[in-house]
Image (spheres, helix red, strand yellow):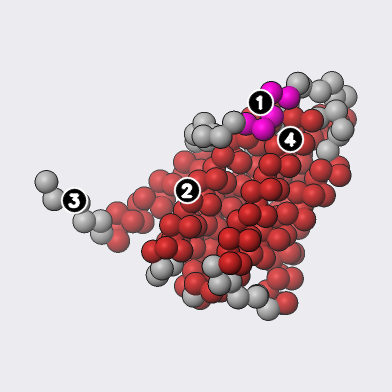
Amino acid sequence: MNERSYTPVDSILDLLDQGLRTVFATPPPSQRDDPAGSVPEGDLTDTQRRLAGGLMRVNHTGEICAQALYSGQAATSRNPELRAQLLAAAREETEHLSWCQGRLDAMDTHTSYFNPLWYTGSFLLGAAAGIAGDDWSLGFVVETERQVEAHLEGHLDRLPEADEKSRAVVRQMKEDEARHGRDAQEAGARELPEPVRRVMGVCADVMRFVAYRV
């Protein structure tokens, strides 16, 4: 039997399906153990629970954006090896999404209502980075992961000490993101110009501000 040849329309529909699943469907079970799985649930006050819920909602949205960024970059990359690397990182981000969703469910709070917007914008940014060329695309990964790692470190400082389950998730995510950045650096990333890095930081700040609240 001959393998089916995928048309551009097939590829577009596949990307749309992937986006809809990421934003609206329940994340698939993590292949790795959930870092929070064996950690006892802490006794949080209502104020601490709202704080932790807001922070983990931001992290959940961050993983939505990561999925979109990697998917956009993979869709426009002309390098099969780089495309495979990006898709492998995206699969790991899906695990992060599952872990964050578990914490939101445990705290009985919602995901960001703006996730469809975050996904769309991030996908377009990723696609633009891929079109710019593999070295620029890898540089985009390095800078993104650098900012995410710093952001997660800040959340470790802000999460209630009693919420060790969320802290365990954030620590593992931080470790994974640092590895993604190192992998991209070793693959030949080009340093992004300072104005681009600043714009990325401003966009991330807006996302965090809005996602924490809605």
Observer-side mark, 3 or 4, equals 4
* Residue drawn at (86%, 34%) of the image: 160
Going from the N terminus, do you reach mark 3 or mark 2 first?
A: 3
Q: In this rendering, is residue 168 above or below 135?
A: above
The quarter holding residue 185 reads: bottom right
Q: Position of residue 103 (x, y in %)?
A: 69, 31
Quadrant for the C terminus in the image: top right
Q: Main secondary structure of the magenta part?
A: loop
Nearer the N terminus, badge 3 or badge 1? Answer: 3
Whether residue 57 can be seen here: no
Q: Which residue is mark 2?
A: 19
Residue range of the region highlighted in magenta in the rendering: 34-39
- Kind of residue at disc 2: Gly
| Residue on which the image places disc 4 | 168
Circle 3/circle 2 CB separation < 8 Å: no
| Other-residue count near label 3 (Cα within 10 Å), few / some / many at <14 / 14–19 / ≥20 | few
The answer for how far apart the CA atoms under marks 3 and 4 are is 44 Å
* Label 2 with label 4: CB-CB less than 8 Å: no
38 within the magenta span: yes
Q: Residue drawn at (66%, 25%), measured in percent from left and top?
A: 37
Q: Position of residue 78 (x, y in %)?
A: 40, 70
- Work out whether mark 1 precedes mark 2 in sequence or the reverse, and give the earlier one: 2
Which circle, 3 or 1, is nearer the viewer? Answer: 1
Tell me which residue sits at (76%, 21%) in the image: 40
Query: Mark number for residue 37?
Result: 1
The residue at the point 48 percent across, 57 percent down is 85
